Image (cartoon, grey):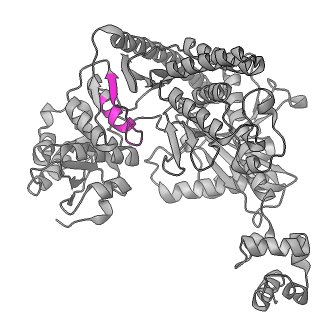
Amino acid sequence: MDRTPADRPDHPSAAERFNEDQATYAVKGSGAPDLEAGVAAIRNILKTLPARPGVYRMQDSRGDVLYVGKARTLRSRVNSYTQVARLPKRLQRMVAQTRSMTIVTTRTEAEALLLEAQLIKRFRPAYNVLLRDDKSFPFILLREDHPFPRVQKHRGARNVKRGHYYGPFASAGSVTRTLNALQKLFLLRSCSDSFFSNRSRPCLLYQIRRCSAPCVGRIAEADYAELVEDAKAFLAGKSTGVQARLGRQMAEAAEAQDYELAAVYRDRLRALTYIQGSQTVHAEGLGDGDIFALACKAGAMCIQAFFIRGGQNWGHRAFFPAHTNDVPEAEVLSSFLVQFYEDMPPPRRILVDRALADRELLEEALCERSGHKVSIDQPRRGSRARLIEQARRNAEEALERRMAETTSQAKVLRELADTFELPDVPKRIEVYDNSHIMGTNPTGAMIVAGPEGFRKNNYRKFNIKRLETQPGDDFAMMREVLERRFARLEKEDPDRASGEWPDLLIIDGGKGQLSAACEMMENAGVHDIPVIAVSKGPDRTAGRETFHLPGGRELTLPPNSALLFYLQRLRDEAHRFAIGTHRAKRSKSLTTSTLDEVPGIGPNRKRALLMHFGTARAVKGAALDDLERAPGISKAMARQLYDYFHPRG
C-alpha cells in the first residue's frame, strides 16, 4: 500500500499532532452496492492494518465519505464490520455502500478521537452523528492593545487580537446584555480606536452614563485601569468583591459630601444587584462549567447546553444532532461533545446527565486540546443535580417545540405539493431574488429551505456580471443567476446523487421572470424541476400575491392560508438576503475608486494623487505631463498610470 499525503488531515493542529509514524492506506473495489462487495473491500485491507490506534474513513464508489470512526486497535475495529450479522441495520447499509477505506494511524486513542472530530466536521458523513448547529459562538473581548482598553463583541479565532476573551456565550443576545451591564457598571468604552482618537467632546454614551469618556480626558488612565480590573473580576465571577468595593466607595463619597459621585456609585451598585438577581440559572460554586442534558422522543434527540462562567449563566442553547437513528443516546452525547469542543475551549468541569462509556478517553482528549485538566461528571445529588434536571427539562421542552414545528412544516409542505401539483413533497426548495438600484451594484441571491426550515449554510449570492447583463434588466439578471447555478450543479453533481439539486424553484417576480427562468432551464436541458413565480398583488399588498406557473396558469391563495404565510416567509427571506447582499456591495463600492485597480498604486500613492488632483476622475483625465508633476509619482509610474486609463488602440 502506498502512503497518500493528500489524504492526510489538512487542519493545522492535526499537522502538529501527527508525526512520521502516521500512515494512510486505501483499497479500491467496484460493483453494485451490496453487502458482499462491501465486506470484500473491507477484508482486502485487513491484512495490511496495524494493531495501533487510528482513524478510518469508509467511502463509496464515488469516493464520498460514508463514515469516520476512531479505534484503539484498527485491525480489531475494522474487522468488526465484516461480521455483518452483528451489525445494526444502519451499519449494514453503510457496509453495503463501502468500496474503499482510508486509514490514518495515530500515537494514542485520544489523538484519534480529536482527529475523528475534525474529519467529521470536514466531510459531514451520512452515517456519523452530526452537530448541525456548529457556527461559532460569540465571546467578549477586553482589548489590551490601547492605554484605554476597549470592550467589544468577538467571533472567530481568539488569537487575532491581543486581550482577554470571555465566553462562549450562547447567543449574540447574551453577549449584548452582558456588554450593556459592563458599560453600566464599569463605564468602559466600546468605540473603535479611530472614533476614540477623533473625539473633541464626549459622545452620547457619556451623557447616559455608559462610558467614562477617556477620549477627552474625563478620567485618568490609572482610574480607568482600575475600572478594567473591576470588569475582569466581574467576568471572572468575583462580583461579590466588586459589590463590596462599590459599596465602600459610595459610602466614602457620601461622607465627603460628594453626592454626585455617590449617586454614580449607587447606580452602578443597583445595576450589579439587578444582574445578580436576574440569573435564571443559579450555579454558585460551579465556577467555569458547561452542562449538557439529552432528551429523546420518537427517534428525535435534543441536547440542551448551559454555559456557566465564574458562576454566572452566560446563556443556553438547544442542539438537534443529525443522523441519530438507531444510535444509543450515550453514544450520541459522546459524539456531540467531541465535535462541540473541536474548536471551542472546554472548561475545567463538564456536567452530563448520563454515564458515558468513553468518559475517561473524552477527558484525556479534551485535556490534551485545552492544556488543562477537564473532568466530566454525572452529579446525582445536590445543587449540581438540580442544574442537570433543569437542563433536562429545557431539552424536553425544546424537543416538543421542535417536533410541533416539524409536524406543522410537514403539513404545509404536503399542502404545497398538492396545491401546485408537484410530483412529491419537496425536500429542497430554492428561492431566487435580485437587487439593484437603477442597475448599479446588481446582485442575485438564493436561499434554501426544506422540511427542517431554512438551510442558511446553503445560501448563495451572485455578483451579476455587467458585461453579460444589461444594467437594470431583471429578466436577464435572473437568467444569468440560474445559468450559473445549474452550470455548477451539472459540473459538480451530474448524477444528482448529493441532494444539492432542488425539488422546487420559487422566483420572486411575475410572468417575465418566470419566462426567463423557464427559458434558461429549457436551454440547459432541465425539464423535471417545477418553477413558481410569486408577484405581489395590487399596490404590492401582502396577502394578495399571485402565483404564476408555466403555461400561463395563475393561482391565488386564501388570505389566511397557512401555505400562503409559508410562501410569503420564503419570499421575504430571499428578499432580505438579496437586499443585505446588495447593501454590502454598495457600501464597499463607496469606499473604493478606480485607482484601486491600477497596478502599482498603493495607499500612499493613491493618497498623494487624490490630494494633488482632488478626485479619481481628475486623475483619470489628467495629461501625462500633469501626472509627472504629481508628488511621489515617477515618470515611469506616470506613464504606466496614463497608459492604464488611455490604452493604445
Would residue 237 appear left or right of 361 to someone viewing this image? Answer: right
Q: Quadrant of residue 117?
A: top left
**Observer-nearest residue: 462 or 550?**
462
Nearer the observer, 592 or 475: 592
Q: Is residue 120 magenta?
A: no
Rendering quarter of residue 466: bottom right
Residue 340 belongs to magenta span:
yes
Quarter of the picture holding the C terminus? bottom right
Q: Name the image quarter holding residue 8.
A: bottom left
Residue 504 seen in the current view: no
Q: Nearer the viewer, residue 280 or 202?
A: 202
Residue located at (56% from left, 30% from top): 230
As drawn, is 569 to the left or to the right of 623? Answer: left
Q: Which residues are magenta?
A: 334-351
Residue 143, x across and y down, in percent: 58, 44
For the N terminus, the image quarter is bottom left
Is 194 drawn above or below residue 295 in the view shown? below
103, 161: nearer the viewer: 161
Specify whether residue 85 is in view: yes
Query: How many labels sit on residues?
Result: 0
Does residue 518 appear to the left or right of 616 in the view shown?
A: left
**What residue is drawn where x is 27% and y is 49%?**
57
For image coordinates 31% across by 43% down, the residue present is 371
